[in-house]
Image (cartoon, rainbow, N blue to C red):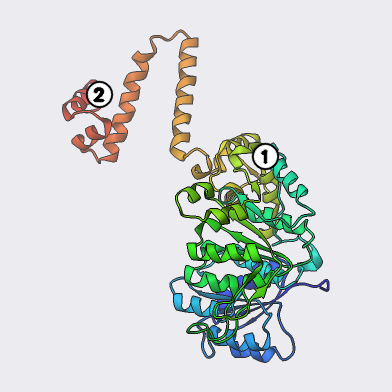
């Protein structure tokens, strides 16, 4: 496709939503037009058309669902992302049945919205920015020098000339979709569609239609034919994420497609042949799911032709500095701020942290630290406790124990012994004062804070001249 910016149109009666989307999409290198009402967008279509459309559902005048139905007839290939309330199941169902590419629940994550626009455009054959995958908002590349990641790279390389089915395993956030995209981009199908679907993110009653499509009139609300993900991916690659959550009935249908390369749309009478490479991913133990009769054994063997495991970050700690540097640079571009650097002590803390959210958590952490760290260099004091940093209380304990150690060294150096004769009374005097202050002079409550009885506190206060 021509070397030009991706055109994204937004329809929403909420000015703040339009503003946020416009800013994020433009930072990602896209061109935008916004409309307050669906009717205004329809008027603009006479002169131009977008590559991707984002529309709200509930608006004055024409609703987003009605707009979807109108555009499905005149622009059947236009990917439309519908914004709807998370609890509004009817609108979500109507959006999918009406041919929406995807829907975003409100309130939505802006990074998710930008990534979804990229996916919609990619599926529709648009190579954003003339094929430049390194610009802002582009899908990040796989990064790593650790042996476990090198094995992943070797596996991708070995499969470069193949269209074999692949099963990608690994914890959430380890980059399973990035591996799938790399497999596609280095395969003979690279110039064909790459279609990704998170099977656990779609209601079970919608997933069959999402995968295989449906005919007009197949069920209530099916007002037009819907092309499913298998047909969209014909000639290319279909990535099915979280495959372990698929229902037994859909597992059976998927097995037939893998075995025979054909299927029927929901409500359809004609068999449809497709040529699709399936790459599946899961964070579950599918072998155990087979043993527990939660996953079909024959489907497991069909998917498990070649397996690639994406390692958790705690098993490739040597890659953490590389990832931090890369995503601090990305965060600076996204937020239009100077790039933060990180000192040695802070880097040691982050390298020692287990990163349960894996690379996805690193991405979010670098954005967060770019915003919250006050200086240009991130120190251990900037790292919050939930990322392995010390809590303020822990730092306070370490500060006073260091001060106590320094005092003891000074006393010993000058021959002032025994230490406890001086230190213990001052220690108790300080704690009693703080406990009495905390309880506004209530002795029984202060004694409880100190772990003493009331009589013990009274005796101590008298001995230490605190009455």
> In the displayed structure, does residue 305 sit left or right of residue 108?
right
* Disc 1 element: helix
Q: Residue at x 77, y 47 (%)?
A: 158
Q: Residues within 10 Å of mark 2 (few under 14, many from 20)?
A: few
Q: Which residue is mark 1?
A: 148
In the rendered image, the residue lying farthest to the right is: 2
> In the displayed structure, does residue 20 sit left or right of residue 147?
left
Q: Which image quadrant is residue 79 in?
A: bottom right
Q: Which residue is mark 2?
A: 465
Expressed as whole percent of the image width and height from the top left, the position of residue 316 reads 64, 38
Q: Does residue 299 show up?
A: yes
Quarter of the picture holding the C terminus: top left
Looking at the picture, tell me which residue is in the foreground, 92 or 274. Answer: 274
Expressed as whole percent of the image width and height from the top left, the position of residue 347 reads 63, 38
Q: Does residue 366 show up?
A: no
Q: CA distance from mark 2 to mark 1?
A: 66 Å
Looking at the picture, tell me which residue is in the foreground, 441 or 167. Answer: 167
Looking at the picture, tell me which residue is in the foreground, 262 or 196. Answer: 262
Image height of 266 relative to 204, above or below: below
């Amino acid at each position: 496709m021509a070397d030009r910016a991706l055109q994204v149109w937004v329809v929403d009666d909420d000015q703040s939503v339009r503003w946020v989307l416009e800013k994020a999409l433009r930072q990602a290198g896209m061109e935008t037009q916004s409309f307050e009402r669906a009717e205004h967008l329809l008027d603009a279509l006479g002169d131009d058309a977008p590559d991707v459309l984002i529309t709200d559902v509930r608006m004055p005048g024409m609703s987003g669902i009605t707009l979807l139905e109108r555009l499905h007839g005149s622009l059947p290939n236009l990917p439309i992302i519908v914004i709807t309330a998370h609890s509004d199941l009817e609108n979500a169902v109507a959006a999918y049945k009406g041919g929406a590419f995807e829907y975003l629940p409100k309130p939505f994550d802006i990074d998710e919205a930008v990534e979804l626009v990229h996916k919609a455009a990619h599926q529709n054959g648009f190579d954003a920015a003339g094929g430049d995958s390194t610009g802002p908002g582009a899908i990040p590349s796989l990064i790593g020098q650790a042996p476990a990641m090198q094995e992943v790279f070797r596996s991708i390389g070995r499969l470069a000339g193949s269209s074999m089915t692949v099963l990608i395993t690994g914890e959430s956030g380890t980059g399973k979709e990035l591996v799938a995209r790399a497999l596609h981009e280095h395969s003979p199908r690279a110039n064909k569609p790459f279609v990704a679907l998170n099977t656990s993110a779609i209601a079970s009653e919608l997933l069959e239609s999402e995968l295989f499509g449906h005919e007009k009139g197949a069920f209530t609300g099916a007002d037009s034919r819907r092309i499913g993900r298998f047909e969209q991916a014909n000639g290319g690659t279909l990535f099915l994420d979280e495959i372990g959550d698929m229902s037994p009935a859909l597992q059976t249908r998927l097995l037939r497609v893998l075995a025979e390369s054909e299927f029927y749309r929901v409500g359809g009478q004609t068999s449809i042949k497709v040529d699709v490479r399936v790459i599946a991913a899961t964070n579950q133990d599918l072998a155990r799911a087979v043993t527990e009769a939660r996953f079909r054994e024959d489907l497991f063997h069909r998917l498990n032709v070649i397996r690639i495991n994406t390692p958790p970050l705690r098993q490739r700690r040597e890659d953490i500095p590389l990832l931090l540097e890369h995503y601090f640079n990305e965060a600076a571009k996204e937020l239009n701020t100077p790039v933060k650097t990180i000192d040695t002590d802070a880097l040691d803390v982050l390298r020692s942290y287990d990163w349960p959210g894996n690379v996805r958590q690193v991405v979010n952490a670098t954005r967060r630290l770019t915003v919250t760290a006050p200086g240009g260099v991130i120190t251990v004091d900037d790292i919050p406790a939930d990322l392995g940093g010390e809590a303020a209380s822990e730092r306070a304990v370490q500060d006073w124990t260091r001060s106590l150690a320094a005092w003891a060294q000074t006393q010993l150096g000058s021959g002032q012994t025994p230490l406890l004769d001086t230190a213990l009374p001052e220690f108790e005097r300080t704690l009693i004062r703080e406990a009495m202050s905390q309880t506004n002079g209530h002795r029984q409550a202060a004694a409880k804070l100190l772990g003493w009885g009331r009589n013990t506190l009274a005796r101590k206060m008298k001995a230490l001249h605190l009455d």
